[in-house]
Amino acid sequence: MGTERKPEAEKEMREWCVALPKVELHAHLNGSVRNSTLLELAKQLGDKGVIVFEDFKDVIMKNSRSRPECFKLFDLFHVLTTDHDTVTRITKEVVGDFAAENVVYLEIRTTPKNNEGKGMTKRSYMNAVMKGLKSVEDVEVVLYDSNLRTDGTLSCTPMSDLADEMKKKKIYVRLLLSIDRRETTSAALDTVNLAIEMKDQGVVGIDLSGNPVVGEWETYLPALKHAKELGIPITVHCGEVPNKKEIRAVLDFCPQRLGHVCCLDDEEWKKLKSSTIPVEICLTSNVMTGGTPSLELHHFADLYNAKHPLSLCTDDSGLFSTSLSNEYYLVASTFGLSKTELFRLAQGAVEFVFADDEVKKSLRAVFERAAAEGL
Ligand code: 6MZ
């Protein structure tokens, strides 16, 4: 299965994967934070005596992490990242990092958080995220309909600025609001209501995530049903651990997309494949958290060969020290996909975005241009 490459060929392939326009559909904000930022934040809190820096440093720098360790880590990360200014900062950095590797459409997902101690509500947390999105420099971030400002007026760029704009990288960013599996029905409903409130600000969907061994599907179901009734697209983390009852209920619910789908039994697998629900594939994450025994045995190959709709994603690029370009490289080096096949895979993901048809049209044009330029 694994394809041996000479060092020069490997370098060339890695560079090609970076140059490839990419669509990222499964990236958790707090899992995508740079290690250097986490260390800097830990140092600041250490200096203030809020935490013991050395303890944080060890966990941040550790390379391999089991699934339970990951979820403990998120709680530690949230100690570092959950105040308004830091949320703004990490949002700005994460978007900049994805744009730098030619991600042209990013659906970033995050859990709106109430944190009384920091004067934070779910709404003020999201306002801090929005502030971060608007403060990205050197990259053109398209958050709404490209010609419409937040105040609803039309924008136009003076001719003198056009040359600069042409040089900038451009990234479409949309937001998914995550329901954490630890939340109550009422907190989950608050998140769905917030998503409705923020529809005109780039929020395009709902995600169900969090520690898969915590909580019950029935707890979130009323909120997910509410979202469905309102026509808000939903993506669900499904089968990160074996859980027959829940996996069946999720497949019956028929969300617009599914994340992971690692631990499905034969019958569930058949049901998934007979559907056209696109799957967000997170190779590195699944290997590191034990959702799959190895890269070579990852269910990507089965779904890809069955021509099931899928898109490659990072999940938590910071936590797992990966990037979307690296995930494409891994598919090439592990499963032997050619550049043409990788291109089609990246292009295909455009059809699964939760943004509207205008955005899809623009993204299709991005890929057509890249093909015409001989990528
Ligand atoms: C399930 C995950 C996850 O929302 O604070 N999260 N949930 N499976 C995964 N695979 C490893 N990776 C991340 O980002 C961090 C939160 O995303 C969810 C967890 O709830 C985590 O606390 P935000 O921005």
Image: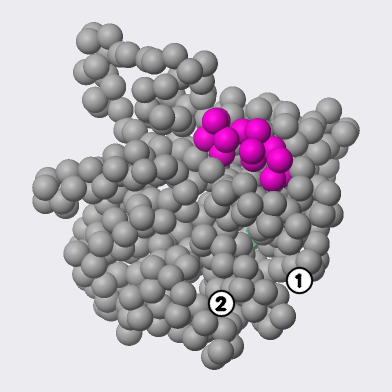
Work out whether residue 52 or residue 261 is closer to the camera in this orientation and state it.
261
Q: Is residue 146 left or right of residue 73?
A: left
Q: Quadrant of the rendered structure where residue 203 is? A: top right
Q: In the image, which disc is placed on residue 262?
A: 2
Percent from the top left, x then y, of residue 266? 54, 90
Q: Residue at x 43, y 51 (%)?
A: 353
Ligand 1's image quarter is: bottom right
312 in relation to 194, above or below: below
Is 199 magenta? The answer is: yes
Q: Residue at x 73, y 53 (%)?
A: 223
Q: Residues within 10 Å of mark 2 (few under 14, many from 20)?
A: many
Q: Is residue 86 visible?
A: no
Work out whether residue 348 or residue 24 is closer to the camera in this orientation and state it.
348
165 in relation to 234, above or below: above
87 in relation to 336, above or below: above
The colour scheme used here is: one colour
Q: Is residue 190 visible?
A: yes
Three-letter amino acid code at disc 1? Val
Is 104 magenta? The answer is: no
The CA span between labels 2 and 1 is 14 Å
Three-letter amino acid code at disc 2? Cys
Quarter of the image where the N terminus is located: bottom left
Name the residue furthest front.
229
Q: Circle 1 is placed at which residue position?
A: 213
Name the residue furthest bottom.
266
Q: Residues within 10 Å of mark 1 (few under 14, many from 20)?
A: few
Mark earlier in primary sequence (2, 1): 1
Percent from the top left, x then y, of residue 153? 44, 14
Q: Residue at x 64, y 78 (%)?
A: 248
Q: Which residues are magenta?
A: 191-203
Q: Residue at x 34, y 33 (%)?
A: 170
